Every structure is written in structure tokens, then in C-alpha cells.
Image (tube, rainbow, N blue to C red):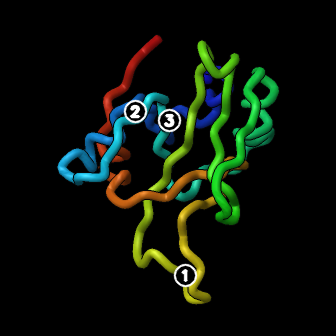
């Protein structure tokens, strides 16, 4: 995953299964068993895009929900022992656009990202890890 995302590593935040901590006091919050990535609503255009790079590195796509674009998970390996990643982006402003459509997802750098409130906090002053 890190190799596939290399051109964008300065802009995305890999948060592991910790996104739920933002919502922990909420009674309907649930822990995540996958590593979501937080990304800003705009990323520099680079070719190939994130989707193409993930697919080239062996990930497969799973489309979820009926939103446009649909939320997506990218899987590496089989379901039992495999790994998957989901992309999250901030939901800023109202929950609906001017046409009354819910702003649940956004396409960013070729991948559909689920939009959630308050995840933009994770983009401010993240820790850097050298590998």
C-alpha cells in the first residue's frame, strides 16, 4: 500500500484502525478492523492515479453502498487473512449539496473516499514515520 501511494505520502495520513476514536463517545461508533487513510479533498493530479497504482500492486476493488461515487474498499489477499484499505475525506459544510444529494463520498485522485465530519483534524500536524 505504501509503495502504491508513494507519490501522495506527503498529503495523506495513514491512521490504521483509529478513525473510530474521533467518534468514541458516540453510542453508535464502531471500531474499524482496517487501516483507513485520511486525505484532503484535493490532491495534486499525478499519473497514474491512486486507483490505477493500487490495482497495479495487486489490490482489488469492492464497491459499497448506493452513493455516487460508491464507497470503495481495496483488498490485498483473501478475506480471511487479507488486508484492505478505505479512504476517508473531510465532510465540510452541509450534509447535502444544492440539488439535495447527500455528500457521502467524493472522488479524489481516482479513488472514492467516504466523507466524514471531523476527520480533517487528523490532517493537522500528523506524526511522520520514516521507513
Could you say which disc has been placed on residue 10 in the image?
3
> Residue 102 lies in what quarter of the image?
bottom right
Q: Residues within 10 Å of mark 1 (few under 14, many from 20)?
A: few
Q: Please indicate, yes or no, whether residue 34 appears anywhere in the rendered image.
A: yes
> Residue 52 lies in what quarter of the image?
top right
| Image quadrant containing the N terminus | top right
| 47 left or right of 89 in image | right
Q: CA distance from mark 1 to mark 2?
A: 28 Å
Residue in front for this viewpoint, 120 or 31: 31
Q: CA distance from mark 2 to mark 3?
A: 14 Å
Which is more foreground, mark 3 or mark 1?
1
* Image coords of residue 14 (percent x, y): 45, 32
Residue in front for this viewpoint, 31 or 50: 31
Secondary structure of the residue carrying tag 1 is loop
* Image coords of residue 8 (percent x, y): 59, 37
- Asked if the residues shown at circle 3 and circle 1 are in contact, with their CB atoms under 8 angstroms apart, the answer is no
- Asked if the residues shown at circle 1 and circle 2 are in contact, with their CB atoms under 8 angstroms apart, the answer is no
Residue in front for this viewpoint, 40 or 111: 111
Could you say which disc has been placed on residue 97 in the image?
1
Which is more foreground, mark 2 or mark 3?
2
Q: Residue at x 47, y 11 (%)?
A: 131
Sequence-earlier tag: 2 or 3: 3
- Name the residue beneath numbered marker 2: 15
* Image coords of residue 18 (percent x, y): 34, 34
Secondary structure of the residue carrying tag 3 is loop
Sequence-earlier tag: 1 or 2: 2
* Image coords of residue 36 (percent x, y): 48, 37
Amino acid at each position: 500500500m505504501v509503495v502504491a501511494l508513494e507519490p501522495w505520502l506527503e498529503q495523506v495520513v495513514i491512521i490504521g484502525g483509529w478513525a473510530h476514536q474521533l467518534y468514541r463517545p458516540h453510542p453508535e461508533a464502531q471500531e474499524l478492523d482496517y487501516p483507513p487513510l485520511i486525505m484532503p479533498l484535493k490532491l495534486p493530479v499525478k499519473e497514474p492515479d491512486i486507483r490505477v497504482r493500487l490495482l497495479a500492486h495487486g489490490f482489488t476493488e469492492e464497491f459499497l453502498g448506493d452513493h455516487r461515487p460508491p464507497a470503495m474498499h481495496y483488498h490485498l489477499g483473501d478475506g480471511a487473512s487479507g488486508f484492505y484499505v478505505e479512504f476517508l475525506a473531510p465532510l465540510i459544510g452541509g450534509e447535502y449539496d444544492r440539488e439535495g444529494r447527500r455528500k457521502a463520498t467524493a472522488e479524489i485522485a481516482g479513488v472514492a473516499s467516504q466523507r466524514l465530519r471531523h476527520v480533517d483534524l487528523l490532517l493537522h500536524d500528523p506524526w511522520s514515520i520514516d521507513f
